[in-house]
């Protein structure tokens, strides 16, 4: 894929699936709805309360992003591109692996209004191809909020981990 965010090869190893979805309790706890989920399965109805959903057939990185965005991107080498796009968009919540040493995670930590490092591991919802598998996360989860409204909503999950608000967040 290409554009102002550069280009990246989609190179998720064949044995690794990105078809693991965010459980509904996350959205219940946030109490937010979203205008867009730019990375959504094409063959499964997820719990993401978003009015518009892009799938791999749309290529969510190429399409316009608008309004409040929910982003749990395909993980792998292209995660950084998604996080960069989200930071640039500046309105929404991103759920990603807590890889604090990765350059994309460092960039998100600098750009976000607030973040929540979750305690323990989230049990993700398996997609069709994984429905007999148990989620085995290789890392913890961090939620990044971009924009004051999303930071405010994320604060509501504060008891589920360590919540950090950046001093430049304006309400
Ligand atoms: C980790 S799952 C998250 C799904 C959903 N956003 C959620 O939070 O439950 C990432 C999804 O992105 C989809 N995906 C992969 N590449 C994509 C692309 N280029 N554009 C849009 N969606 C894509 C995958 O099929 C997968 O369903």
Image (cartoon, helix red, strand yellow):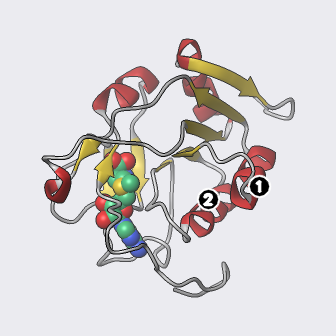
Image coordinates for residue 138, horizontal then vertical, percent:
48, 46
Mark 2 neighbour class, 10 Å CA radius: few under 14, some 14 to 19, many 20 or more: many
Disc 1 to disc 2: CB gap under 8 Å: yes
**Residue 116, visible in the rendered structure:** yes
CA gap, disc 1 and disc 2: 8 Å
Question: Which of the two residues, 149 or 155, is positioned nearer the viewer here?
Answer: 155
Image coordinates for residue 61, horizontal then vertical, percent:
49, 73
Mark 1 falls on what kind of element? Answer: helix
Image coordinates for residue 103, horizontal then vertical, percent:
75, 60
Q: Does 35 sit above or below residue 53?
A: above
Name the image quarter holding residue 121: top left
Name the image quarter holding residue 93: top right
Q: Residue at x 39, y 76 (%)?
A: 59
Side (left or right) of 136 relative to 90: left
Q: What number of labels is visible?
A: 2
**Residue on which disc 2 sits:** 83
Q: Does 29 sit above or below residue 43?
A: above
Q: Quadrant of the C terminus?
A: top right
Q: Residue at x 51, y 52 (%)?
A: 67
Side (left or right) of 103 relative to 74: right
Mark 2 falls on what kind of element? Answer: helix
Question: Which of the two residues, 51 or 151, is positioned nearer the viewer here?
Answer: 151
Question: Which of the two residues, 142 or 139, is positioned nearer the viewer here?
Answer: 139
Name the image quarter holding residue 151: top right
Q: Does 165 sit above or below residue 37?
A: above
Q: Which mark is residue 107?
A: 1
């Amino acid at each position: 894929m290409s554009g102002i965010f550069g280009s990246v090869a989609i190179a998720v190893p064949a044995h690794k699936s990105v078809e693991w979805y965010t459980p509904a309790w996350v959205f219940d706890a946030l109490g937010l709805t979203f205008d867009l989920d730019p990375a959504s399965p094409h063959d499964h109805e997820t719990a993401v309360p978003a009015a518009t959903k892009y799938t791999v057939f749309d290529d969510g990185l190429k399409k316009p992003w608008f309004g409040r965005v929910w982003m749990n991107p395909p993980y792998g080498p292209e995660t950084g591109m998604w996080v960069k796009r989200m930071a640039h968009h500046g309105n929404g919540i991103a759920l990603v692996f807590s890889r604090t040493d990765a350059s994309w995670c460092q960039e998100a930590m600098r750009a976000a209004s607030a973040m929540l490092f979750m305690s323990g591991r989230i049990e993700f919802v398996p997609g069709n191809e994984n429905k007999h598998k148990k989620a085995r996360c290789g890392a913890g989860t961090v939620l990044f909020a971009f924009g004051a409204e999303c930071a405010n909503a994320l604060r509501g999950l504060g008891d589920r981990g360590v919540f950090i608000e950046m001093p430049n967040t304006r309400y």
